[in-house]
Amino acid sequence: MSRKPWGRALISVVSLVTAAGPYRADWNETHVKNPAWPPHAKFHNGQTMSLGLALGATSLWQLWRRPTREGLDAGATVASLYWLTQISALAYPGSKAVDPPGTAKFPQAVVAFPALAVTALGYVLERRRLARG
């Protein structure tokens, strides 16, 4: 029986990417510093970046404050929310994953789908570890 919390560690990696990734991706001339973006678009971009930080930190807190099933459930759910909402954003009228002249359909998929898969794997591993006591 493995006593090491590999599942929580995997979800923690996703949580750290969720917290820091939006800043890495958006704090540049294509987003926050884009002079063509209206102030309200920048507001929503800032809101999304702050949400990623808050979700990542909350997930880590839930996962590590007490190694319980409840903490795992909450931590994994919170770790998934940013990525699920990013995918769902494509369903809104007129929404696209990139601005012109970009032509990519959904470049964020290279992070979003693996993040969800790693979270699911971490969840399964940690559930098994917790069940073994």
Image (cartoon, rainbow, N blue to C red):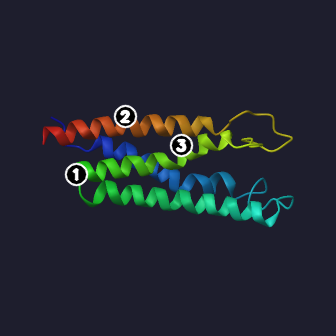
Whole-percent x and y of residue 35? Answer: 85, 62
Q: Which mark is residue 84?
A: 3
Whole-percent x and y of residue 50? Answer: 58, 63
Residue occupied by mark 1: 68
| Marks 3/1: CA–CA distance | 24 Å
Q: Decide: marks 3, 1 in contact (CB < 8 A)?
A: no
- Image height of 76 relative to 45, above or below: above
Q: Residue at x 29, y 53 (%)?
A: 71
In the rendered structure, the answer to whether residue 132 lies left or right of residue 15 reads: left
Callout 1 secondary element: loop
Whole-percent x and y of residue 105? Answer: 73, 33
Q: Amino acid at mark 1?
A: Thr
Q: Residue at x 12, y 43 (%)?
A: 133
| Marks 2/3: CA–CA distance | 16 Å
Precedes in sequence: disc 2 or disc 1? 1
Precedes in sequence: disc 2 or disc 3? 3
In the rendered structure, the answer to whether residue 101 lies left or right of residue 19 reads: right
